[in-house]
Amino acid sequence: MRVVAAMSGGVDSAVAAARALKEGHEVIGVHLALSRSPEAVRAGSRGCCSLEDSADARRVADKLGIPFYVWDFSDRFAADVIDNFVDSYAIGETPNPCLRCNEKIKFEALLDRSIALGFDAVVTGHYARLHDGVMRRGVDDSKDQSYVLGVLTQEQLRHCMFPVGDTEKPLIRQEAKALGFGVASKPDSHDICFIPDGRTQAFLGNKIGLRPGIVANTKGEKVADHEGVYGFTIGQRKGLGLPRSGLDGSPRYVTDIDAASGTVTVGTREDLRTGFIVADRLKRLDPAVLGREFDCEVQVRAHGGVVPARAVLVEDPEPRTPAGRVKEAEESPWRLELELLEPLEGVARGQAAVVYQPDPEGDIVLGSGTIRFTAKRAEPEEKR
């Protein structure tokens, strides 16, 4: 096959490209230019899209003897990832920009261009396994990235290759070293690539501006002021501008964010417990189960816990979410309701709920949805 290897400049994508070449595929290397911001290309950037990363990717491509190109998706990235990130925080959601980047850039913009140019697939260094259209968790539990790939459609998966998903990370580094790649010991990226200094609240403040509101307790009583709901996330404990603990001596956490009124609610850890989730923007869930309950496991953060759940797909006639986000044209006409058999803490609107089918050979990704509503339990009047 003729394949495009997405080369981020890291060790995983380097070995993925090498393995695709070894398997006999015709490979070209492509690095994605996602930002023209000086902060994103400075020396020492801890993201994944700097000029240094581009140079590292080119050196690997030269070592492999494959053509190398830089494709500029900075406009798409700004509109589909950065603007979405800002807009989501502005309405009190907690988005995952890496997941959005996979959905809109790496496996939509990149894949669409690759197919249009006559290539058969895109190769990436994600830690997930894909065989006959079935995606499973990567072998290395500590590096598994199936969660951030849960937004892919079945058609997109037909044109994907994840060559490193069957190997643990230390062995990938050993393989890179044996191949003579300078990135063999390069640290993993760990920041939001368009906020390389890690100051997310300052970034959002510059984009959104001051939107004063109040911090209230679970009784609705004001306990502090704030400059914008974008400075908070569900489950947050530090930086609340409050005394260290409540009147009973227990820590306080952000338990709810109402962007419309500008109210951030704080409560106890018990108030964070979630037992019921409603999600929309569904991807890959089989419509054959519409209206039928099925058992599954659900994960709501890239490195969060996994809990058993009872799920059901139901028709969703609402044109917008409770937070006010107008649905996108391609969105599924169904919503996913998840009754958690074990509670999760700190579940926020805007996060992805990725649903798995447990399997001894590796949990199977059934699909995903974007969380739009949470509650302690499923009550009839709350189901929507």
Image (cartoon, grey):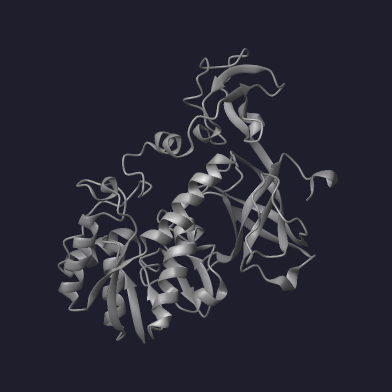
Relative to 43, say whether 335 is above or below.
below
Residue 158: x and y in percent read 50, 79
Q: Is residue 17 left or right of residue 360?
A: left
Of residue 259 and residue 216, the one placed in the foreground of this image is 259
Relative to 351, say whether 122 is above or below.
below
Seen at 45% across and 75% down, the residue is: 112
Whether residue 317 is visible, yes or no, is yes
Q: For the view shown, which residue lies furthest in the top direction? A: 247
Seen at 27% across and 60% down, the residue is: 10
Of residue 128 and residue 75, the one placed in the foreground of this image is 75
Whether residue 161 is visible, yes or no, is no
- Number of numbered discs on residues: 0
Residue 49: x and y in percent read 30, 56
Q: Is residue 95 left or right of residue 143?
A: right
Residue 218: x and y in percent read 69, 24
For the N terminus, the image quarter is bottom left
Of residue 62 and residue 207, the one placed in the foreground of this image is 207
Q: Quadrant of residue 14?
A: bottom left
Q: Quadrant of residue 13?
A: bottom left
Q: Is residue 373 left or right of residue 60?
A: right
Residue 351: x and y in percent read 57, 49
